Amino acid sequence: MGGLDALPALYGRVLVPEPVLRELEAGAQLDDTARRLRMVPDIEVYALANRISPLLAGELDLGEAAVIQLALDLPGATVVLDDLKARRVARRSSIPMTGSLGVLLHAKRRGKLDSVAQGVERIRRHGGWLANDVVERVLALAGE
């Protein structure tokens, strides 16, 4: 499953906003993440309760705006964001967040992942960009 099946054990309720799933499906020829997400019974595709704020939509890509809108709809939700601009918006809105590297590190610490480095490689292989200096710090924290 590539680690997606571990997310509910790590975080409890896991919601993926519909616009994020649509973005993943649009890139399906490059990556099978959308298909794998649908295979994990404890990951829910979430229809936003409110329309995405025009302020968010004007500042961020649709997927990132949807993630932040979800957190605004569900106070206390922790979001996963890697985009720097989206992280700044979340911080300004006091939304708890982590990034892909934080998820990998948490999974390793909880015994759900053997290697953070392999997770990093998978993200990069599928087009994800991660800053080398941040990767190095996280690998050091993971003891790799």
Image (cartoon, grey):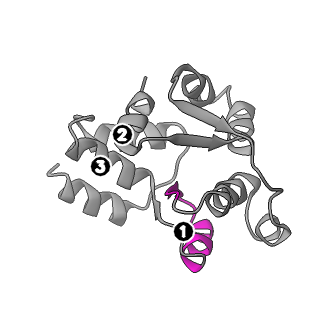
Q: Earlier in the sequence, mark 2 or mark 1?
A: 1
The residue to which callout 1 is attached is 95
Secondary-structure class at tag 2: helix
The residue to which callout 3 is attached is 106
Question: Residue 68 vs residue 121: left or right?
Answer: right
Q: Residues within 10 Å of mark 1 (few under 14, many from 20)?
A: some
- Give the magenta range: 77-92
Tell me the amino acid under the disc marked 2: Gly
Determine the image quadrant of residue 134: bottom left
Report how far apart the C-alphas of labels 2 and 3 lie in the structure: 12 Å
Between 19 and 143, which is closer to the camera in this rendering? 19
Tell me the amino acid under the disc marked 1: Ile
- Whether label 2 touches label 1, CB < 8 Å: no
Instruction: Kindly identify the residue that appears in the image at 43 percent across and 62 percent down.
Output: 131
The residue to which callout 2 is attached is 119
Q: Earlier in the sequence, mark 2 or mark 3?
A: 3
| Residue 90 falls within the magenta-colored stretch | yes
Q: Nearer the viewer, mark 1 or mark 3?
A: 1
Determine the image quadrant of residue 140: bottom left
